[in-house]
Amino acid sequence: MSADAGSLGERVALVTGGSRGIGRAIAIELARCGARVVFAYRSNLEAAEQTQKRIQEIGGSAWAVRCDVADLAAVEELIASILREHGRLDIVVNNAGIARDQLIMRMKPEDFDAVLATNLRGTWNVCRACARPMLKARTGRIINLSSVVAGSGNAGQTNYSAAKAGVEALTRSLARELGSRGITVNAVAPGLIETDMTRELSPQRLEGLQAQIPLGRLGSIEDVARAVRFLASDDADYITGQVLRVSGGLG
Ligand code: NAP
């Protein structure tokens, strides 16, 4: 077992979008380090059950809850149920996200709104709902998933890159609001990671993007999960309002 196992003690962590991809790896990593993990998913029950099973197999604790992060009332109920069940909430990872890529002339207004609703408003909803219990506890860790395109921009992603730039600005503002109460707020900005989201890219686009990565390979979901675990741990006590790129140098 690695030296990090157990480093999160009995802390309670919420990971949104934990049924698949990066969120699943984060949920597993936090559970491996001793956290009691609650993860939210939108609709894919089968994938959520797989994550839960993987965590139970390593002797961890996991609770899967269906919750659309774009729905503030549902998010408030989720946070309330975590507090009822576990009595505390120490770590929140805003990972749930979607992409609806298209060049602007072809992008439908609904695709712009859907991406903003999940990626930006969803992050804000969860931050708002978890702020009160964290302020009361005078401790907490909030980690928001951004993307390198927040800084670089990307053709075909006017909706997605705008949402992620918003997530980074939200992260910096909230870090200023909550810092005096011992709560840190940071973002992790992955580059190109192998998940369902990137499997939708054409082989030509993928090849072109891979050629721009200094480390020469796509990232793994575990690469991102380890960075999130670091920001959730005591080792990151004095880090807030930052964006940590996990991109192999891309961006
Ligand atoms: P993914 O494989 O497509 O998984 C998305 C996850 O989010 C699923 O668990 C999904 O639940 C959940 N989700 C989507 N909409 C939701 C909603 N409204 N409410 C609650 N849960 C919702 O995505 P991923 O590639 O792992 O990406 C995870 C995060 O990293 C996202 O924020 C993404 O923008 C960011 N990111 C990814 C990459 C990359 O290369 N993959 C790069 C940069 C940033 P269901 O299973 O129920 O659908």
Image (cartoon, grey):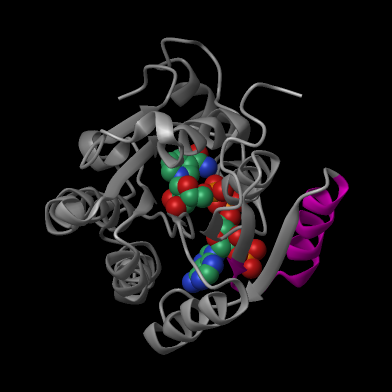
Q: Where is residue 224 in the image (x, y as percent from the top left)?
A: 52, 34
Q: Residue 102 occupies which quadrant of the picture?
A: bottom left
Q: Where is residue 173 in the image (x, y as percent from the top left)?
A: 13, 54
Foreground of the two, 51 or 89: 89
223 relative to 186 in the view: left or right: right
Residue at the (47%, 54%) spot, across then down: 95
Q: In which quarter of the image is the N terminus?
A: top right
Look at the image and say whether residue 55 sits in the magenta stretch: yes
Eyeballing the image, is 90 above or below 232? below
Residue 135 is at least partly visible in this image:
yes
Q: In this view, does 39 lie to the left or right of 235?
A: right
Q: Residue furthest right?
A: 57
Where 66 sits versus 169, above or below? Answer: below
Q: What residue sits 70% from the left and 40% below the top?
A: 32
| Residue 197 visible to the viewer | no
Determine the main secondary structure of the stretch shown in magenta.
helix
Q: Vertical placement of 171 versus 49: above or below?
A: above
Residue 129 vertical position relative to residue 5 in the rendered view, above or below: below
Total labels drawn: 0
In screen coordinates, is 71 left or right of 52?
left
Answer whether residue 193 is magenta in the image.
Answer: no
The residue shown at (51%, 11%) is 216
Start and end of the magenta stretch?
40-57
Task: Check the picture and name the quadrant holding the C terminus.
Answer: top left
- Name the one closer to the observer, 131 or 8: 8
Residue 11: image location, x then y, percent: 55, 53
Q: Nearer the viewer, residue 95 or 3?
A: 3
Residue 49 falls in image quadrant: bottom right
